[in-house]
Image (cartoon, rainbow, N blue to C red):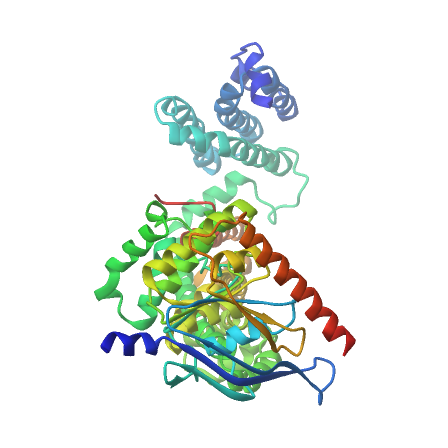
Amino acid sequence: MVAAAAAEASSLRVREVSKSFPVPDDPVARRLTLDSVSLSLAAGELVSLVGPSGCGKSTLLRLIAGLDSPDSGELLVGSEPITEPSAERGLVFQDPNLFPWLTVRRNIEAGLVARGVLREKRHEADEFMRLVGLETFGDAYPHHLSGGMAQRVALARALINHPKVLLLDEPLGALDAFTRMRMQDEVLRLWQARRTTMLLVTHDIDEAIYMSDRIVIMTQRPGRIERTIPITLERPRDRSSADFLRLRGDILELLHFAGNAVAAV
Amino acid sequence: MLQEADRRGEVNGSGIEAASTAPMAMAGLRSAATKPTITKSRLRTLIVAPAAGAIALAVHLLVSKTEPPPETRSYTVFLCVVVIAFVIAALVQFVWPGLRRWMRDMCPIFAAALLLLCVWETITSGFRWLPLPYFPSPAGVLQSMINDGALLFDSTWHSLILLLSGYALGVLAGLISGICIGWSSPVRYWGMPVLKVVGPIPATAWIPLAMVVSPSAIISAASLIALAVWFPVTMLTASGISNTRASYLDVARTLGAGRAYLIFRVAIPAAIPSIFIGLFMGLGASFLTLVVAETVGVKSGLGWYVSWAQGWAEYGKVFAALVIMAAFFSTIMTVLFKVRDRVLVWQKGVIKW
């Protein structure tokens, strides 16, 4: 019972959320970015969000992170409404955004310092550096790291707070193809070890199929949920299996169709 | 590449010989310029400074023949000490790699400085091209420096105290106002116009007012220096803070950061490179304000000393004070550079493993 309640606490619900932004050169007009989006993630679920650029994926992630607030609608983690950013909801951007003035170790410890628990939990920094394979780089400064290493530090920095929900905004988008595939496995490993609820924004259909339990497809602006596709392939998944490729073809077709539909309206 | 070529060249170790036999400064200069190309680079860096010193010494002995010995003896001693010091350094560097690296870097500069002294001496006491007493020879300047050593030391000390207290005050005030203006938009709204209107007035323009208002000249000078420092430090701190990348702040907030963390551990570290630019600009402004304040109001310090010596037409002392000022200000500047290198180690390619 207790375990079920704990699991329930890290579920994520987005109900009828809309968000618009002012148009830069027009003081009155506002552009609708998200139009009544509803989405829910069970605890421990890994869901990918794909869609054309400018469809409001990143906006939705910022709303869930609490960095912006919606015009209407409701966002909940467990039964708690989201009103402001919190260490419960980690966010990793495409740019690792490591603090360049801190060493790798201090970057990873940042969350502990921010929450004022560094003294008790300092050992966790070692644990997380090991987890992402950077234990020998503790004293290096971020600009000495490769893109993949920097992104691993960013992941460790987000994970050290044990967030209930981890939001990933194209975290692997800037990496080369090989590093990217390795990092996908890395993220999956972390996810399986910690069972954190994860919402992954990506442009890469392969990545979405390879990693997620479900793929949510969004339409062009204003962003709406077009469709949700459950991925039931056995893990670990084979990127070249027939099922994988068929699914990939279906989704690509769907995205193409979704694009045309919007253009017709 | 150059060193490679030099190493292949013939060893010709008679660099000093040409210098010591040079009948004229110009001949000496030419031999110093042509010699190194056919000597090993290692040998060149070793020889160039003592050679320049020897040339300066030779020129000095030649031109000062007509002057009374007590006036020039200390400069002779000084040049001898310099030459001996460089010869010793040239020997010690064989067993001390750190010194060797430093010498390879600095010897050409020292040699050029010594040759410059030599040129100065030639056109002052040598050819007497420049009118006396306004342009004394280096020997005369050194003699004034030694004769008036106690007062110069005292003046330097007073300048140092005044400069540091004014600078510290200005930096403190500038950091506080800069952080407030950079971080909070209401403070920026009300503070920025004040800053933009009052800040650009040169601090020295306040001198008449400061002398009336303040109880003592020292306090008014310190506050003027502080004012001169305050403006650039505030401006660059504020711009550094308000230009903090929004994504750093976003990341920190999703890590559970409160306002104190965002200001002191994100915005301020992100602004440090900009803050240091303000600190350097403020330092330059503080030197200027210090000297002007000492010249017109305060009755101590190097600025006061210069105008006092000028009043007695003792230009040797004026130059002596200028030389000390140059050394004094550039030392302080160097200290600030070192501090910056330490603080901004994360910007450089330095890793401590």
Residue A44 figure quarter: bottom left
For residue B298, say whether it is visible: no
- Quadrant occupied by the C terminus of chain B: top left
Q: Residue at the location (37% across, 66% down)?
A: A196
Residue B23: percent from left, percent from top: 61, 19
Residue A163 figure quarter: bottom left
Instruction: Establish if B281 lies above or below B129.
Output: below
Q: Judge by depth and name the residue closer to the eye, B4 or B197.
A: B4
Instruction: Establish if B211 lies above or below B270.
Output: below
Residue A190: percent from left, percent from top: 37, 57
Instruction: Establish if B62 lies above or below B177.
Output: above
Q: Judge by depth and name the residue closer to the eye, B319 or A77.
A: A77
For residue B252, say whether it is visible: yes
Q: Residue at the location (66% across, 43% down)?
A: B130
Residue A165: percent from left, percent from top: 40, 71
Instruction: Establish if A251 lies above or below B64.
Output: below
Residue A219: percent from left, percent from top: 65, 73
Q: Residue at the location (60% across, 17% down)?
A: B5
Is B41 on the left-hand or right-hand side of A81? Answer: right
Residue B231 figure quarter: bottom right
Residue farthest toward the left in the current orientation of the protein: A120
- Quadrant occupied by the N terminus of chain B: top right
